[in-house]
Image (cartoon, coloured by chain):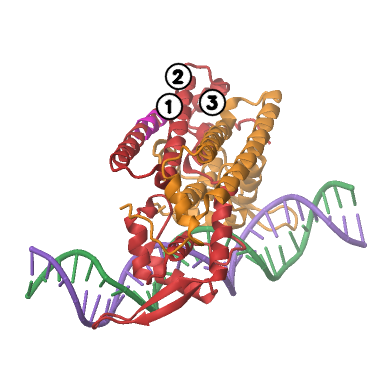
Chain colours: A red, B orange, C green, D purple
DNA sequence: GGGGTCATGTAATAGGTTACATGATTCT
DNA sequence: AGAATCATGTAACCTATTACATGACCCC
């Protein structure tokens, strides 16, 4: 996100789509939408023309032809350039080959967990478990439909990856709840005491650095 | 991130730290740093005073006392307010209880995978596998040290969660490589043909929407 | 004739990061 | 003597999202 001239993931999606064949921006958007790319990539179609202009500015795409039909606004068909193709390969390659720390909401929450009383934490974690189960159920249903339609798995690997992560998340959550409830979590006593003497009482917990 | 008046995770970290005891901003930062919270929460200490001002503005914290020692800049000790405590509980509760779609880099990459030739994809995935193994190794080493120091596991749940995700990621990646190399991935033929007839040839792949 | 979609674009705003600025104190 | 740390703050900047604006075409 730092040294790459354009960081918006929509730009990569546009590049990939134009690598397939030249299109005008709106068609790129409908293509991406029809393939439900917004479910696996954080896309904001409102930024479409901004992004297209940026790609144009850096020479990653170029206008192929521009015409109008009837009284509709003039539309420009763009194609990907050689530098654009390079950028796409490099960018996509990086996404695939290089794991980066992602800072998930839950990880942040867990690292602040001691600030909640154990009983409330337990309840919240159980709630999370239920929601994860529901999410998993929905995703599996989607996969079942995809299978019925004989869509090759190649085109839903991202969804299977997501499912794998959800399962790992659920397993972790369930186990954590059990450890708290079963009293086997190391540190549980400290945690209880922290909240026993009044609301998050003045006593400072031990330093961990 | 939308309806919450302050969305910056640093603000939550500040609230939690001040819930423990009143401090001046700089001390909050050193506390967070010493506990290595930046490893599990995306914190930008450069935004510290901006965030503190925002918290103050919305009445989530308030100045307790303000003094100066020697010729140093005057420093203000803040404490959390009742609304601040509420906000903290609500926010933290949401992070724990409610799974949200996170849009990881890898998932984005996977959803665009067909744009890469299978051979290159395989190589990139293998590279990812190696890096994940290294990451996992490092994390396990950290955990071993923590165990030696007898730090209660309660204070490293976030790290164990992260480890669980890394493992799931690695398992998925390894399996995907095997399916491509073993030729058992459904859609592999389409994929090969897509790239056989020239560079990401003009042939449009089937619609999937 | 009215609502939705086709199709493009821009201006304002929001949100956060970076860089800069200051100056004393403490460590080496 | 010089570097690092203590301690605070602000202004500029960047990036992206939101909202607005326009107008023709198509279906019911």
Frontmost residue, A88 versus D7: A88
Q: Nearer the viewer, mark 3 or mark 2?
A: 2
Residue A181 badge: 2
Q: What residue range appears in magenta? A: A125-132
Q: Which image quadrant for residue A139?
A: top left
Frontmost residue, C27 versus A58: A58
Task: Please tell me whether residue B126 is drawn above or below residue A17 in the rendered image.
Answer: above
Extreme residue toward the front, this view: B197
Q: Which image quadrant for residue B87?
A: top left
Q: CA distance from mark 2 to mark 1?
A: 8 Å
Can residue A5 be found in the magenta stretch?
A: no
- Residue at the disc numbered 1: A122
Chain for numbered disc 2:
A
The mark nearer the N terminus, 3 or 1, is 1
Whether residue B88 is visible to the viewer of this picture, yes or no, is yes
Q: Is residue C4 left or right of residue B23?
A: left
**SS for callout 3:** helix
Whether residue B50 is visible to the viewer of this picture, yes or no, is no
Q: CA distance from mark 3 to mark 1?
A: 13 Å
């Amino acid at each position: 996100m730092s040294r790459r001239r354009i960081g918006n993931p929509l730009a990569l999606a546009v590049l990939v789509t134009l690598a397939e064949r030249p299109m005008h921006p709106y068609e790129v958007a409908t293509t991406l939408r029809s393939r439900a790319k917004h479910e696996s990539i954080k896309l904001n179609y409102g930024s479409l023309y901004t992004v297209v202009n940026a790609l144009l500015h850096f020479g990653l795409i170029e206008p192929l032809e521009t015409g109008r039909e009837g009284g509709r606004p003039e539309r420009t068909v763009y194609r990907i350039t050689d530098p654009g193709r390079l950028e796409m390969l490099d960018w996509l390659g990086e996404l695939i080959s290089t794991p980066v720390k992602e800072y998930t909401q839950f990880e942040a929450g867990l690292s602040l967990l001691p600030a909640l009383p154990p009983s409330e934490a337990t309840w919240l974690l159980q709630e999370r478990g239920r929601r994860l189960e529901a999410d998993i159920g929905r995703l599996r249903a989607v996969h079942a439909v995809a299978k019925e339609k004989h869509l090759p798995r190649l085109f839903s690997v991202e969804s299977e990856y997501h499912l794998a992560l959800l399962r790992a998340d659920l397993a972790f959550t369930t186990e954590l709840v059990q450890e708290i409830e079963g009293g086997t979590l190391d540190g549980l006593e400290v945690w209880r005491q922290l909240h026993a003497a009044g609301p998050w009482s003045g006593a400072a917990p031990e330093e961990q650095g």
